Every structure is written in structure tokens, then in C-alpha cells.
Image (spheres, rainbow, N blue to C red):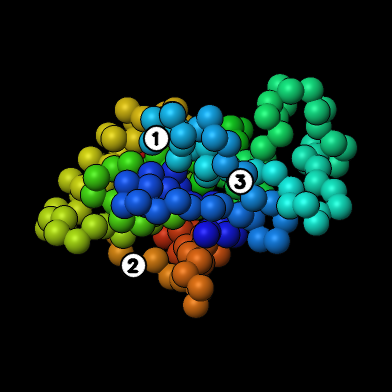
Amino acid sequence: MTAGAAPPPSLLSAMSQQGFRVAHTYGPSTICAWKPEWDSLPPEEQACLNARQGVPYVGLEGLNVVNNQNMKPVPSDGKTHPDGYIEIKDRSKDIIISGGEIISSVEVENVLYQHPAIFEVSVVARPDERWGESPCAYVRLKRGVDVSNQNRLAEDIMKFSRSKMPAYWVPKSVIFGPLPKTVTGKIKKHLLRAKAKEMGPVKKSRL
């Protein structure tokens, strides 16, 4: 069972390949109730479905998805959330606003976890002279990865990103090293945001 921060689909897929059946919950409130018809889907699609936070526990009195501008419930119209499952894209404080575009740090991380050299990654906002903010990726590499040329590695990760995600999602900065964590293993994003701010803004000449 995993709870709290949403695990990347790549992690759920890898666990599944090892024979684990992971139940994904969000604290004491919701669970991603597995549907039998999902058993026949490809592993990658199963992992994406299971990465969602799911449906309310029986003991939960109420659950709503609301518009953060007016705090009114979004319509239960079968389109705004088609099957009644909920997926948390990001915490409001972790959202990156780049050139007026809203970027979910979690969605960028989910793509980066597909890179063969990345063991762990956390994406935060870094000041950017051109865009206001841009994604900054803190990366812990897998064992055995050649780290002698980190500039080349960073460029490879950016090239991979450009092939997998919208251009404005692509991290403008890639920093290698261990990631600060709480005693329960949660990455301390507030420390990474502070470090990104201390580095100063990404210069306009960097595209």
C-alpha cells in the first residue's frame, strides 16, 4: 500500500513487474479502487490509472472537486472527471507559472522518471528572467550511471524531455545530487525551492 504523495506511474509499473499489487490511497480519505476490466490493459496504462487518488472510502461523508477561483464544485457531467476518480496534479504551492502557462511539477516528474538514468527526481520553480519561472529538476541518478560529464547528462535529460513533453515543461536547469527528505521519505520541496532561488534566475540567453 502507498499513501500520501502520488507515486509516479513508472514506479507502480516497476512494482507490478516484480509481482506486487499496489493499493494507492490518499491518507484516510480516498483509494484507487481497482476495476477488474483494468487487468487486461497494458502495464503502462494500468500504472497511469492506479496513480490516481481514486474514490472515497465508505466512511468519508463527502468529497468534492472544486474550482480554485470560486471554490464551487465542478460539474459531475461525466467529462470534467469521467469515471468519478480523482487525480491530484500538484499542490498549489508547487505549481510553476512559466510565461503565463501553468505547469504541474508532478506531471513533469512523471515524464522524467521514464529516463533510464534517473532514480529520483523533484521539480520546482526557479526564477527565470524571460519566463518569470521555469522548471528546475533535481536529479538523483541510478547506480552505475557515468557521472563524469554532468553537462552532457543534463543535456541528454533536456533532449529526452523535449521529445516527451511540451516545450514549456522542459526543465531549464538540471541539478544532480541527493534529495533532502523527511523521516518518512517525502522529498522536502521547500528546501529545493529555496536552493533554486539562491541560484538566481535563469538568464534570457538560455533557451
Kind of residue at disc 2: Pro
- In the picture, the disc for residue 165 is none
Instruction: Tell me the SS state at disc 3.
Output: loop
Instruction: Tell me the SS state at disc 1.
Output: helix
Lower sequence index among marks 1 and 2 = 1
Gap in Å between the C-alphas at discs 1 and 2?
27 Å
Lower sequence index among marks 3 and 2 = 3
Q: Quadrant of residue 99?
A: top right
Mark 1 neighbour density, 10 Å: few (under 14) some (14–19) many (20 or more): some
Kind of residue at disc 3: Cys
Kind of residue at disc 1: Glu
Gap in Å between the C-alphas at discs 3 and 1?
16 Å
Lower sequence index among marks 3 and 1 = 3
- In the picture, the disc for residue 32 is 3
Whether residue 11 is visible here, answered yes or no, is no
Q: Which residue is rendered at x = 23% and y = 40% of the image?
A: 156
In the image, 197: left or right of 164? right
x, y percent for residue 76:
80, 28
x, y percent for residue 165:
41, 30
- In the picture, the disc for residue 178 is 2
